[in-house]
């Protein structure tokens, strides 16, 4: 009797049929699109533009920016336990990340900050900027995962499918970042 009672309390998980995937996109497509956008923007900056920014500097700077970026990601993913964002707030973070891409593209092209102080000291400023890039990405990721699980309007049986599709969308974003950085590398930054 106990086993059958536990079985009744287990949520049903929708299989990835066309109808269920369509329903998942209809109910949580904004979350998924946000993941694609922020991952594309984030990975365009790191490792793409960051590689160009540190191309002629000491080897340590690429590693320092990697550490700074991941510190920002880790801190902001933890932040979802303290505060949670609504979907429209996440769009603001995504727009901020878009502004970061523009600023970092200008910096990688011009070296204005990098070259502003002697002995590569300008790269300390750029490294601090990488913390902000990580904060944007981690905040979006953590809050999107929260929204997949808690946002109203997503049917319970579709939530897990939505999370799985969200992971696929983040991979799509990373792939698009490779394409976008290749375009930047072959045009503006060549």
Image (cartoon, grey):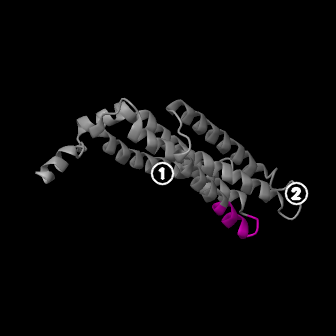
* Residue stretch rendered in magenta on the structure: 56-67
Crowding at label 2, few (<14), some or many (≥20) Cα neighbours within 10 Å? Answer: few
Q: Is residue 136 above or below residue 28?
A: below
Residue appearing at x 64%, y 62% in the figure: 66
In the image, is 107 to the left or to the right of 37? right
Q: Is residue 15 above or below residue 23?
A: below
Residue that extends furthest to the front in the rendered view of this protein: 2
Q: Main secondary structure of the magenta part?
A: helix
The residue wearing badge 2 is 117
Mark 1 secondary-structure assignment:
helix
In the image, is 121 to the left or to the right of 1? right
45 or 157, nearer to the observer? 157
Residue that extends furthest to the bottom in the rendered view of this protein: 59
Residue appearing at x 60%, y 45% in the figure: 136
Q: Is residue 10 above or below residue 66?
A: above
Whether residue 60 is in magenta: the answer is: yes
On the question of residue 24 being in view, the answer is yes
Q: Is residue 157 above or below residue 185?
A: above
Q: Quadrant of residue 120?
A: bottom right
The picture places residue 179, in percent across and down from the top left corner, at 53, 49
Q: Quadrant of residue 92?
A: top right
The residue wearing badge 1 is 175
The picture places residue 54, in percent across and down from the top left corner, at 72, 61
Residue appearing at x 39%, y 41% in the figure: 149
Residue appearing at x 36%, y 31% in the figure: 27
Q: Which mark is residue 119?
A: none
182 or 153, nearer to the observer? 153
147 or 23, nearer to the observer? 147
Whether residue 45 is in magenta: the answer is: no
């Amino acid at each position: 009797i106990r086993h059958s009672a536990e079985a009744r309390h287990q949520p049903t998980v929708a299989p990835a049929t066309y109808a269920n995937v369509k329903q998942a996109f209809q109910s949580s497509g904004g979350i998924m699109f946000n993941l694609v956008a922020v991952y594309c923007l984030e990975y365009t900056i790191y490792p793409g533009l960051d590689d160009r920014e540190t191309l002629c500097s000491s080897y340590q700077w690429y590693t320092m920016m990697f550490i700074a970026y991941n510190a920002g990601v880790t801190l902001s993913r933890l932040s979802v336990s303290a505060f949670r964002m609504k979907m429209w707030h996440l769009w603001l973070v995504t727009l901020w990340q878009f502004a970061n891409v523009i600023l970092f593209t200008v910096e990688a092209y011009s070296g204005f900050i990098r070259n502003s102080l002697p002995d590569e000291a300008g790269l300390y400023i750029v490294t601090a900027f990488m913390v902000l890039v990580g904060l944007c990405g981690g905040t979006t990721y953590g809050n999107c995962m929260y929204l997949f699980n808690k946002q109203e309007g997503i049917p319970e049986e579709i939530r897990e499918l939505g999370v799985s599709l969200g992971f696929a969308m983040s991979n799509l974003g990373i792939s698009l970042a490779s394409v976008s950085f290749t375009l930047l590398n072959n045009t503006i930054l060549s």
